Image (cartoon, coloured by chain):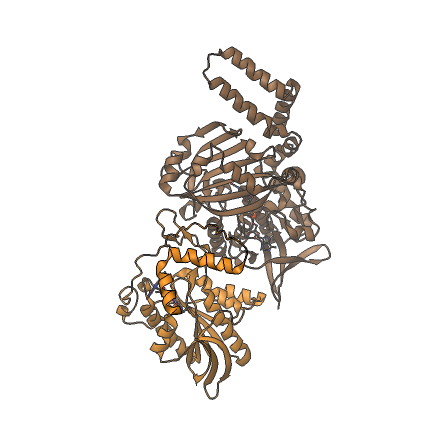
Amino acid sequence: MAEHFDAIVIGAGPSGNAAAYTMAKGGLKVLQLERGEYPGSKNVQGAILYSDALERMIPDFREDAPLERHIIEQRMWILDDNSHIASHYRSEEFNKQPYNRYTILRAQFDKWFSTKVQEAGALVINETTVTDLLMDKNRVIGVRTDRVDGEIYADVVVLADGVNSLLAKKAGFHAELQPKDVALAVKEIHFMPTETVESRFNISGDEGVVIEMAGKITKGMMGTGFLYTNKESLTVGVGCMLSDFKASKVSPYTLLDEMKQHPSIKPLLAGGEMKEYTAHLIPEGGYEAMPQIYGDGWMIVGDSGMFVNAVHREGSNLAMTTGRIAAETVLTLKEARKDLSARNLSAYRAALDETFVMKDLKKYRRMPGVFHKNPQFFTDYPDLVSQAARTMLTVDGIDKKTKEKQIRKEFSSRRSLVGLLGDAFKMWRAFE
Amino acid sequence: MHIVVCIKQVPDSAQIRVHPVTNTIMRQGVPAIVNPYDLFSLEEALRLKDKYGGRVTVLTMGPPMAEAALRKCLAYGADEAVLVTDRAFAGSDTLATSFALASAIRQIQNDMAVDLVFAGKQTIDGDTAQVGPGIAKRLDLQLLTYVSKIESLDLEKREITVHRRAEGGVQVLKTKTPALITMLEGVNEMRFATMPNMFRAARYPLKVWDKDAAGIEDVTKIGLKGSPTIVSKVFAPTAKSQKASMIETESGDPRDIAITLLTKLFTQHPKLEKEIGKRAA
Ligand SMILES: Cc1cc2nc3c(=O)[nH]c(=O)nc-3n(C[C@H](O)[C@H](O)[C@@H](O)COP(=O)(O)OP(=O)(O)OC[C@H]3O[C@@H](n4cnc5c(N)ncnc54)[C@H](O)[C@@H]3O)c2cc1C
Ligand SMILES: Cc1cc2nc3c(=O)[nH]c(=O)nc-3n(C[C@H](O)[C@H](O)[C@H](O)COP(=O)(O)OP(=O)(O)OC[C@H]3O[C@@H](n4cnc5c(N)ncnc54)[C@H](O)[C@@H]3O)c2cc1C
């Protein structure tokens, strides 16, 4: 006899865990399938956790979740070839509990989240890949796995299978991912003693620092670099649009390697032991690239539905929020004994529209386009800004007024005044 | 027929990290797996079950997290699983481990007589290869190690014939059951778990035994007290760095290459030259 569940969740990343947890907690019979050896085993290490999305499901998560450091300082760097100009924001406010942001190691965090899912009553089966959605005409009625006798049935299937969902593509819910809508990020973890991390970043206890970087490190490609402090390691990485990697023919690995040699970054990593080089896609197409996210007997949550705010580097919180809201939609419909048809599941989309997820994605809908059409943001500007700073800070007997003139000349020779104004306007519009 | 397979959860040595500063082995965050050698024994046990019917019980002594290793074995097709876990077992060496496991197997026997016990050839962490033989001795089982093939099993006559790898050849051995067998690596391939078995493994109510349930009364025989061996430190030896050098020869002639190499070798190790000279004479 084939098994039948109220809901099947495909994938055990943040979005799948949120969905499975919420539905199981609500009393539904839930099966979660994950292809990795255990939840987190396939997930890229080192990330930032935004408390709010998790807190809405597990208010006391701080008691036992594997958290690395809470972030008290955010640094933004703009780099040219051998300098950086920076803004640092550090505040004692960030040292007040409950903390808002943490660095985490995904492998450990996902595993922890999964134990919560199991405690809530969901059946979690790892090392099992869903290969097909079972359909009855237009309706999804279950899944087929890569195992013998692998058909399993459910009233609703939640696709939480991450970026580049092969299943959604196969079923025709998605078009092929466009290289301009995905970034490729590579990252590494560098181990070093806790004391070294603390002294290098001027932190103690569980305090942590995040550095976001833009500029020449991406060689003119649209993208950013980042560095996070963990307990006894640093996460360092860089991501750029896949279309840019294709056009530039720069290999992601070389890009990261050269970034690590940058005189502003190299000393921070010195002496560490590199472990775990990973590459992963990030869906960054935003609102404009979002696919249909529900239908008869199915819903899409997390990266699979393009739910990433690339500008603020938020992904896992959108994943958890979409997972939770999809689950709440199912719970409400089940309680009212309503059919899980496309018509009824449209409540999922309606509920999402009221959250920060859709509001933020809508707000930044023009951002990817602006950056794609205007590479100067990643080429000329870093140089210009850095030069300007250097000119002002070099004491060489030239008066400041002349220096300011020099800087202005430099800017307008590289980019016309109209261009500069235009860029400012585009940025403003995109952020607006 | 009833077969007990002893399995151990071990850190995946392929993913172990060495602390860059202290050179100690960092187990934290390293995924745990079923000792790979044990899977050859489990697969062989499952094949016997396929052929003769009966029950396969997997047994491990370890921390609560060893549950995952047992569930994996259930997914492959084992019928029952026993986790022997108790703080009192902490620090056990092979002597104490085989004592505890032998005691647990006696308890398992109460339910259904055991015909065969399987263990892995050795583990990838402790690497001693002593636990299997230790259990055999304590339970008075015939011991068949390094088995490459089970030729025949006669349940009526209680006889088993196996091929055993020995130095310089293969021994064909016949003995009485109950026996304890350790399989050689590479002699079979673990099957792929079916979906129904995945469900059964996920839902199976594990048998979790503390020392009392495992039938252990004498606490001086287990844990640190029962362990004359104490593993005080585990570390990675520092890698010896030796530079490679290019050796040039006059021509590509093999004779020429051989002579150049030997000359170089003998200048670096004069003792070797003497020794070889002696033997040649
Ligand atoms: C690096 C290291 C070195 C060690 N050196 C020694 C030493 O020199 N002397 C010593 O006495 N102890 C030693 N120990 C401790 C030893 O690992 C454990 O105490 C013992 O429980 C298992 O021995 P083993 O791993 O060598 O197993 P082995 O004897 O190599 O295992 C053979 C088989 O026995 C079965 N088995 C082993 N342990 C279990 C278990 N817990 N549950 C179920 N089945 C099991 C498995 O089928 C396994 O394949 C060492 C441990 C480590 C981590
Ligand atoms: C380099 C990098 C850095 C990032 N940094 C951050 C950050 O700092 N903060 C942040 O909030 N977000 C960050 N993100 C984004 C974040 O990682 C994602 O948004 C988030 O993981 C999405 O969660 P998810 O559950 O939708 O997908 P995933 O986490 O990708 O999980 C999908 C799961 O589904 C499984 N799966 C896929 N297909 C199948 C199948 N057919 N059958 C069974 N299982 C399947 C996979 O094995 C995987 O476990 C980063 C992403 C990258 C690549």
Quadrant where the image shows the N terminus of chain A: bottom right
- Residue B116 percent across, percent down from the top left: 44, 78
Quadrant housing residue B104:
bottom left
Q: Which colour represents chain B?
A: orange
Residue at image location 49% in from the left, 55% down from the top: A120
Residue A327 makes an appearance in the image: yes
Q: Is residue B103 rendered to the left or right of residue A310?
A: left
Is residue A336 visible from the viewing direction of this image?
Answer: no
Q: Which residue is painted at 44% across and 80% down in the image?
A: B115
Relative to A420, say whether B78 is above or below.
Answer: below
In depth, the one of B232 and B275 nearer the eye is: B275
Q: Residue at x 55, y 68 (%)?
A: B191
Query: Residue A136: x, y in percent?
Result: 71, 58
Quadrant location of the C terminus of chain A in the rendered image:
top right
In depth, the one of A432 and A336 nearer the eye is A432
Question: Residue B135, relative to residue A218: is it above or below?
Answer: below
Chain shown in brown: A
Residue A63, position as x, y percentages in the image: 40, 47
Dividing the picture into quadrants, the one containing residue B226 is bottom left
